[in-house]
Image: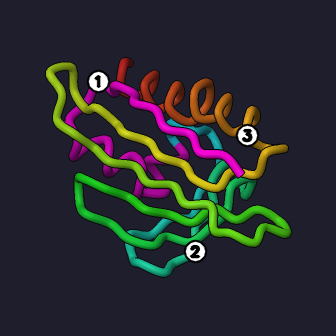
Amino acid sequence: MKTHKKYYTIPAPPEEVYLALTNPLSIKLWSGGEAQMSTEAESEFSLYDGDIVGKNLAFEENKKIIQQWYFDGQNEASIVTIKLHQHPKGTSVELLHTNIPDENFDEFVDGWNTSYFAELHEFFED
């Protein structure tokens, strides 16, 4: 199991980034895939047409999202924590993804960098 931590800068205020990460219609606009999302703790979610699924654990409006991402046959929970901080250029996003299975690590780091946050950044640039 591995951990990935990285910071991203998104050219929008934290309130808009939070909405883009928690509203299913907004998620579909920037990701291009169907999404099921709620800001209710313990609710299930689905991103990228079901390629990513899990459970929402906690929310702090405009500041933090904590999720459990599901991997088949995994013993320890894979936890994603996204913290949003005000930044001169918009929002500094702090990502911490723990307990990523070794065999999925490179794929997920690439996905965070070239899909998830790259698409979100591009959405707000336009």
Locate residue 36, reporting x and y percent: 57, 64
Between the C-alphas of marks 1 and 3, the distance is 27 Å
Secondary structure of the residue carrying numbered label 2: strand
Secondary structure of the residue carrying numbered label 3: helix
Quadrant in which residue 86 is drawn: top left
Mark 3 surroundings within 10 Å by alpha-carbon count, few (fewer than 14), some (14 through 19), many (20 or more):
some
**Considering only order in the chain, which callout, 2 or 1, is on the residue closer to the N terminus?**
1
- The stretch in magenta equals 1-28
Q: Residue at x 29, y 23 (%)?
A: 11
Locate residue 66, reporting x and y percent: 43, 62
Up/down of 52 relative to 4, above or below: below
Up/down of 99 relative to 118, above or below: below
The three-letter code of the residue at mark 1 reads Pro
Q: Residue at x 40, y 28 (%)?
A: 8
Q: Which mark is residue 105?
A: 3
**Considering only order in the chain, which callout, 3 or 1, is on the residue closer to the N terminus?**
1
Q: Nearer the viewer, mark 1 or mark 3?
A: 3
**Considering only order in the chain, which callout, 3 or 2, is on the residue closer to the N terminus?**
2
Q: Which residue is disc 2 drawn over? A: 44
Between the C-alphas of marks 1 and 2, the distance is 28 Å
Q: Residue at x 68, y 69 (%)?
A: 76
Residue 60 colored in magenta in the image: no
Q: Which residue is disc 1 drawn over? A: 11
Locate residue 122, reporting x and y percent: 46, 22
